[in-house]
Image: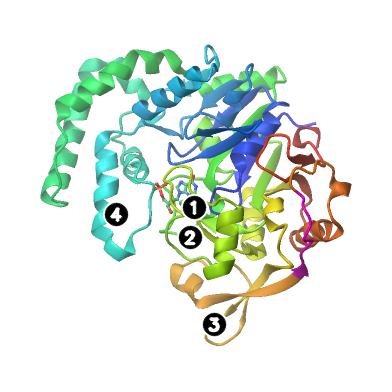
Amino acid sequence: MKLTVAIIGTQWGDEGKGKIVDYLTEYADFIVRYQGGNNAGHTIFIHQKKTILHLIPSGILHSNKICIIGNGVVISPKDLFSEISKLKKSNINLENRLFISKGCSIILPYHIALDIARETKRGKNLIGTTGKGIGPVYEDRVARRSIRIADLEDESNLRDSLKELSDYYNHQLVHYYYTDSIPYKKVLQDLISFKDELLLLSSDVSNMIIQGIKLNKKIIFEGAQGSFLDIDQGMYPYVTSSNTTSGGIFAGTGIGPHYLGYVLGVVKAYSTRVGFGPFPTELFHDENDYFFKKGKEIGSTTGRRRRTGWLDIMMLKKSIIVNSITGLCLTKLDVLDELSEIKICIGYKNKINNNVVLDTPCSIKEWNRIIPIYRIVNGWKKKTLGIKKFNDLPFEAREYIRVIEDLTGIPIHVISTGPDRNDTILRMNPFNF
Ligand code: IMP
């Protein structure tokens, strides 16, 4: 039996983690986010009702579970409270259920303006960020000048540090990016208006989790984005600014590695990515249209069309190592239902000399130099949507699952066959592993 389960995206995010977190929340007591901010978008369907969460852990939709936001998460107070008020309007009670670390850095309007100004200046070399200020706020954190929730406790200090930041950023915005400055007084007023509510939600998250474990509480660590967007392990510089891989859990919540029992790697039955950067198995034209339409591949945070491609086992194997993955969860299997054949990328070769490339590359130059080697397997051309038992899946779908297990050496413990919470096959409950 395991007390703690991490749910991690193994690709570029949008693997369907939100649904899986929501599904497994039934077996958990605490759901904890540890990195990223409202750049994430977790879409959950319950009885056809769609909810998109950006910041609050997906477990909030279950009435009696505790949701925790760890110090590794960056908070936009305005977006946090707008999400809270939407949930309240849907009759979701948040009282004594949402706790936020005082160590979280606060996203200020300067960060958002700078994120957008930088992308505009990059021209065709843009990263394709979500424009939520994520890069700039994490920069402030690393530079030891960010405003954290704890700083709201001392208003006089807050005024001074915000003034310094405001001068620093307005100088860049006006004199380097030639955009408008943002008035310090307005930013300060807004921050002060959120102060009491934010401090009321704040808590010692590390202690809460450890005390919870001691009391045999079951805990889910909910990842945001995916492994190839990790600042250290991803396709730098086409990455986000946090550690999306399982290592981020420890620094982002204040618990040690000893406490992590099981890591569930979530992998879509094909691949998608939003934003720019290499994508070895990317599809274009009709094939791309198929996944786009059938998989409804539109970004839930920015509304951008996602790029689509075949499943890449080389990347998946890398994710398995980087995250210490125990078992996999295969999502959106039903999206493949109409295909007569399916490609799986099982290796790479150098497109200049045709030599086989044995590992995932390290630099963008190397990524751009490789092309995929495919294995083709039969499609099933039958409906899998909503199937709840493994043995009810068509033979070819079971084969597809077996091939992925063979190629990675990791069991697929959970399969998602549709967007609804109940469209799920649970072969092994991670908490019972
Ligand atoms: P940022 O996180 O807004 O700085 O964006 C950096 C990169 O990460 C861009 O390619 C974004 O499209 C991507 N990204 C950020 N959050 C998500 C997410 O939740 N899902 C998928 N891609 C994301």
Q: Is residue 381 magenta?
A: yes
- Way the structure is coloured: rainbow
In magenta, the rendered stretch is 377-384
Q: What residue type is labelled 4?
A: Glu
Image quadrant assignment for residue 22: top right
Res. 321 image quadrant: bottom right
User: Disc count in the image?
Assistant: 4
Residue projecting furthest to the left = 175
Provide the secondary structure element on which disc 2 rests: loop
378 with respect to 302 (left or right)? right
Q: Residue 235 placed where, x, y %?
A: 48, 60
How many other residues sit within 10 Å of disc 1, few (<14), some (14-19) or many (≥20)?
A: many
Looking at the figure, which quarter contains the N terminus?
A: top right
**Residue topped by disc 3:** 351
Q: Is mark 1 within 8 Å of ligand 1?
A: yes
Which residue corresponds to mark 2? 235
Q: Identify which residue is drawn at 57% across, 29% down.
A: 32
Dots 1 and 2: beta carbons under 8 Å?
Answer: yes
Where does label 1 land, which residue? 229
Q: Is residue 299 above or below residue 24?
A: below
Which of the image's four quarters has the C terminus?
top right
Left or right: where 222 falls relative to 338: left
